[in-house]
Image (spheres, rainbow, N blue to C red):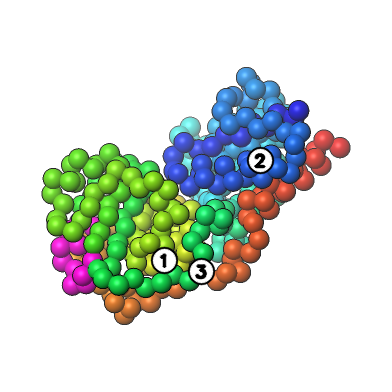
Amino acid sequence: MTKILFLSRKRGFGHKKRDDLIAEQLAALDKSLEIVRSGTVSGEKPGLVISDERLDVLAEARAKKIPSVLITNWFPAKAWRSRAGKPSYKTFNKAGLIIFTDHPKVAAAPPFIRPPVFFSGPIIDKARAPRGKRKKKKGPRRILVTAGKTEPVDREFFETAARAFRMMRTKAGMTVLAGGFKGRLSKSAPRGVKIEKYLPDASARYAEYDLVITRGGHTTLWELAFHGVPSISIPRPFYANPCNLGYAMNMEKLGTTKAIPQGFITASSLAYYMDNILSGRTKLRKADPALFGGDASRKAALAILRYFRAGRR
């Protein structure tokens, strides 16, 4: 058995979901692999290290001459620095291969990134997606507000959405997935707003809603685009996540979401955008099916195996 150490970033549900799909494909394609999902490079002594944005392990793998693969959906700007003050892109360059989970029509690798970059396309669980065309539901429209894995900076986002609901003209109901803020928000939630800590299997249920308000997470935006669910993206501030605004603006160019920086949003303006989208005055569309061609997780797994086998010859 060949041991592969596959480490996922701890922040963000989307990272774990795509890593689970890639790991399943690797195991199916090569029965001789033992995929270890936790541990250290020194402790496990693997034949290959796969890191989903766990940048800390790339340097250790390089030092021990262990081939490594970086899975990511963002590239750093050349001016960005790590906490140690070193250029962030130099850490990316320690990988032997980069799997970029986006489409080359949407994003591009900067010239200072040296490892080969394989564009797998967006990795989502299409097998669990609702079948057929979304049907318009009768009665009040349904709105979902989600931040994915909640952070302290999300409190204002949730509170603004609840205040905006009060100002809407469209008859609707709202569900807010507030995580640890459930208790605090439940005390002041207006009638018609349901506060939940989380929604089991939320991504597979997006199609049940007429509008989703999100923080602009990469996987979430692609899942909504695949389902054809209109969305409003209010990315976290740059200091909390420097990439979310970029994801949202890229998807806005595709016509699948309305992107609004948090500093520019108010309850009244959010109510205006929600009314316009739900009434059809602002039209958002489903992403081009060609962007989801094939199984992206299988493509990623095949690229990883080609890189690994080529290095063993």
Label 1 or label 3, whichever comes before in sequence order: 3
What residue did someone put label 1 on? 229
Q: Amino acid at mark 3?
A: Gly
Q: In whole angstroms, how far apart are the C-alphas of marks 3 and 2?
A: 36 Å
**Badge 3, how many Cα within 10 Å: few under 14, some, many 20+?**
few
**In the image, residue 1 lies at what x, y percent?**
76, 28
**In the image, residue 117 lies at what x, y percent?**
67, 52
Label 1 or label 2, whichever comes before in sequence order: 2
What residue did someone put label 2 on? 69
* Viewer-side residue, 20 vs 137: 137
Query: Which marked residue is nearer to the observer: mark 1 or mark 2?
Result: 1
Magenta residues (range): 160-172
Please tell me whether the stretch drawn in magenta is mainly helix, strand or loop: helix
What residue did someone put label 3 on? 132
SS for callout 1 = loop
The answer to whether one can see residue 124 in this image is no
Furthest residue toward top: 43
Which disc number belongs to residue 246?
A: none
